[in-house]
Amino acid sequence: MAISNTQVIFDNLYGIFTYLAFLVGIIVFALMAYLIIRYRAKKSSSDPEDTPRLGRIPTSRGHGRNVLVTVTLSTFLLAVLIITSFAAVDTLFPNNPPNATWCYSIAAYNQTQTAGQSCPRLDVTGHQFYWVFTYPGARSYTNFFRVPVNTTVVLDVTSADVFHDFGIIQFKIKTDAIKGRTNTIWFIPYQTGTYTIQCFELCGTGHVGMIATLAVMNVTAFQSWYGSAK
Amino acid sequence: MNTTYLYLLVFAILVGSTDIEVNIVALYPSASTGVAMLFGTIALSYGVIVSILLGLAGMKALLIALFYQHLKYEPRSLSSWVLIGLVIASLLMSLVFIQLHVH
Amino acid sequence: MSQDILPPRIRRWLFTTNHKEVGILYLVTALFFFVAAGLLALTMRTQLSVPDNHVLTETLYNQFVTVHGLLMIFWVLSPFAFGFANYIIPLQIGARDLAFPRLNAMSYWFYLFSGVAIIMSFIFGAPDLGWTLYSPQTAIQFSPSIGLNVGAAALILITVSITMSSVNFLVTMFKMRAPGMKLRHMPVFPWAILVTIFMMLYAFPSFLAAVLLLYVDRAFGTFYFSSIQGGALLWDNVFWFFGHPEVYIVLFPAIGLIADVIPTFTRRPLYGAKYVIGSMIAAAIISFIVWGHHMFVTGIGLTSTKLYTVTTIAVSLPFDVMVIAMIETLIKARIKLKAAALFALGAIALFVIGGITGVYLASVALDHALRGTYFVVAHFHYIMVGGSIMGLIAGLYYWFPKFTGRMYNETVAKIHFVVSFIGFNILYFPMFLLLDMPRRIQTYAPDTGWGSLNSLATLGGFIFGGAQVLLFLNLFLSQRKGLPSGPNPWDGWTLEWSLPSPPPAHDFDTIPTIAEDGTYHFGDSPGLPNGAGYPNGSKIGNGYSHSHLEGLSAWPIVVAFAAFIFFLGLTIGQPNNPTTPVTFQPFWPLIADGAILGVIALYGYSRERFSVHEETRTESWPFREVPNVKLGIWTFLGAEVIFFGVLIGAYFFVRTNSPTWPEIGSLFDIRNGFAMTLVLLTSSLTAIMALVSAKIGSRNGLISSLLATFGLGVAFLYIKSTEWVYLGTHGVFSVASGLPATSYFITTGTHGVHVFAGMLMTLYLLVNSLKGRYLKGDHQAIEHFGLYWHFVDIVWVFLFPLFYLI
């Protein structure tokens, strides 16, 4: 199910990694199991000719060629992973995030929308042990915030005290909340509903309860909430 | 005593370059212009002077290591061994530099 | 020291310097901490078994999480491996002991006392912020607990222990191999230890610097890690610059051990042995440039994160080669699935899973979702428990007959493996599926749906933990009642198997030589000792056959105890202002006791007649012409380069992150710095003149040069202290007044301590040279002092422009 653009990108990439992981894992384990069963010591068999024995350094064994083949094959696999990861990270966490559009439904921002400019970013601040979400005009909410569905939301995340980590669990995105720094993340929610935000860095006694809620609303509901709430 | 002269010569170079270090500071853009000092409008910018200073320090360190710690006369294996520490320290520095200055 | 008042048994274990006994001490202590840390883990698993559980309070849970991590990483995995290394490596390379036996004993006692300190921290409120000790939570205003200070003391002590033992092993393995034993003839285990200490040598100084700065922050109210100008990221950088190599530090010994166990039980040589060793070296080097993958979500910028993604993914290639080589070893083999082989093969299988999932975390894109979740916990436990602990247990079964002369019960050992392996996977595999669950949380709500997987993991935890009872029972009973093993029960090829089990105190009657064709010679003829086939080992003495009382020294334990007292004194005081703590008052009486005892003990140590037996013929490429002590000093200085590199890097880091910095000349008088530079440069000249005088035999020249060096040291510290006093009394410039002050006082202060230590050495040398020592051929001590002194000079050569001129 597509919950947000970030979750879709994560799931696709995770799928590629897992597919290759199983491929490699099955080959390695099958080979290991086969070799162990095939070459188990039998009473009747005797040691191979080159068995290492006390009294001399063992003869060397193995071809550089095989090592080269292994490394080349792995490099090829790993290159796929690097390239797909870079593509994902360029979209998800670029140095300059895309324009925010969450405010386009609100009358006060009609000009912004016409000009195709970015809506203000929302500020997120981690405190021991709660999250504060701030909308334009210093409207702030503790431990919950709301955004309209299918719009781009950009968050500036920071901390008021210790090292926290802001993660929206179902959206599969996260960024550290560090005092003195602002880290930016963005997402487009695809489904209305509520989602869990939790702190992912141990930040003291109280960390376990540092949980907030994100409500993704349909546009009209968001409009009326944003207009009525003060 | 040849070695004594060598050590005295090294000492002279060390002191001489320290003198250069101290005097080069006078070439910094004037302090009163504030920001210009950091970004440098006159001949020698801040970055250039810092590079010269660090280069001189590096040269002094090298002289001390080569002659006073007589690495120059030690087997190649030992000097390479010492070099490894420096290489790792400089890897640390350069990656941190990228973190701070390249985004 | 009057050591004779104690009974011989106790004296032997307290004062031993024999590598085998020290090895046993390491192993027993590490296993003790393994049980302690394991019990913490089982308690946490109980707490997590069902949602909304409250067996442990959150504070206690956080303390358990932290101490479990610290104990396993610092006090279990490495010491466990170094117990083997102590016992086995001298035997495998044909040496009679380590290069510096007393230093080795001292390493152990530092390790033991550091462990006592970390356990003691529970009395004061143990560290409760995760083993990674992220700042600024470590700042005293967020964590006023004294337990964290005591934890810092423990970490400093164990870092000292590790640094001493890495210098020791390095010199031993480079310089003391049996004649004819080229580096490439060494088995893989010693190679793995060699690569491990290489990483220890350069990674731990960074950690030491980090912990020292943390301590200074807490004690004196400085701002390295609590500053908003990059303090948190500074800790991340210096901690993980150490932290990632540390992962391989705890892993490589087990890999090396497995690579030696597998050929013994498959009866075929290791496939591509030289590529395995080459891969280890490659991975060790790359391990120093991957630390940023622990910082993917700190916002360090796209270029950096991509760079670290590439280096981290690339580091999987050498591991790939190692694993494939081990598997290819099985081809056309004759595999005997004894317990040691089962654990070795099992460890590889688990390591493969840990390695593959590591690639997930190397990807910056996936890490944004997986960071801080149970996926990470599963991944690194597959590496550290699956790879390291399982591999080390293979070593325990493998060498148990060598240590005790007796066999363990094979059937019980196999049951131990099967139950452990199954329990392990029930314990950790579900955690991969918990990829949404944050790690280090004390409990979770029922509606998260994490309950059933957690219950399963807890079940697995108890199976895995319970299985270890079999291990301890088996080994404990077998070392008393097991059947005699003989010298070589597994028909292994490495040199330790040529000795009786357990080996005699001096190890080898005759040091073996390795001929060009790779055969061992004991004495003149090829073959085993005395040409009589396997030595007769069916007789087992009472306990250890090396229960002799030679080579005892009481000083190592006393020095370590003094250091323990000293650091405890530094850390167990009271916050100066308990309501809003900013600084911290150390407990001076203990510091004084520790310092006095330490000086006495070090003096006793240096005066004690302790002869180290040095073979005349050893294989010592590539350091044939470098004496042991000199190699040791240069190695130590290499570690110091990293230590000061980190301090200077920290200065550079906070300065770059600060929007403003005082202008040149506004804080420090350049003339002061210039004067100190001249003084120190001149003292280098006098130090080298001392060496020249000693070499040509001029006693007066030596004494006057040393006097001049000492005087110049005094002059340097005098100018320094007047500057400090001036800065402290005039205006706002104190340690606590911001980053320019903090970085200045800490960096030049650390340098000042080095100068002071050098002056103490000068004093010691002066006293002895007045007695007419060090002349002509006896000049080594003067030379070694000089190497240190010039290094301190070099550090100042960089500090002068960095602080005064830019």
Image (tube, rainbow, N blue to C red):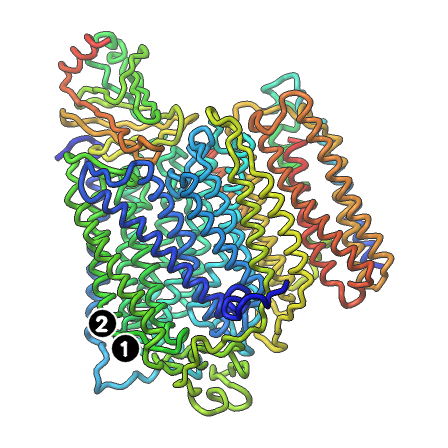
* Pointer 1 with pointer 2, Cβ within 8 A: yes
Residue C688 falls left or right of residue C400: right
Task: Write the residue at 70% across / 61% down.
Answer: B73
Type of the residue with mark 1: Ala
Q: Position of residue C249 (x, y in %)?
A: 43, 56
Q: Position of residue C713 (x, y in %)?
A: 75, 44
What is the number of the mark on residue A35?
2
Residue C520 falls left or right of residue C49: right
Chain letter of disc 2 in the image: A
Gap between marks 1 and 2, in whole Å? 9 Å
Indicate the quadrant where residue B2 lies.
Answer: bottom right
Judged from the image, the secondary structure of the residue bearing numbered disc 2 is: helix
Answer above or below: position of A47 versus C726: below
- Is residue C215 something one can see in this rendering? yes
Of C716 and C120, the residue lying toward us? C120
Chain letter of disc 1 in the image: C
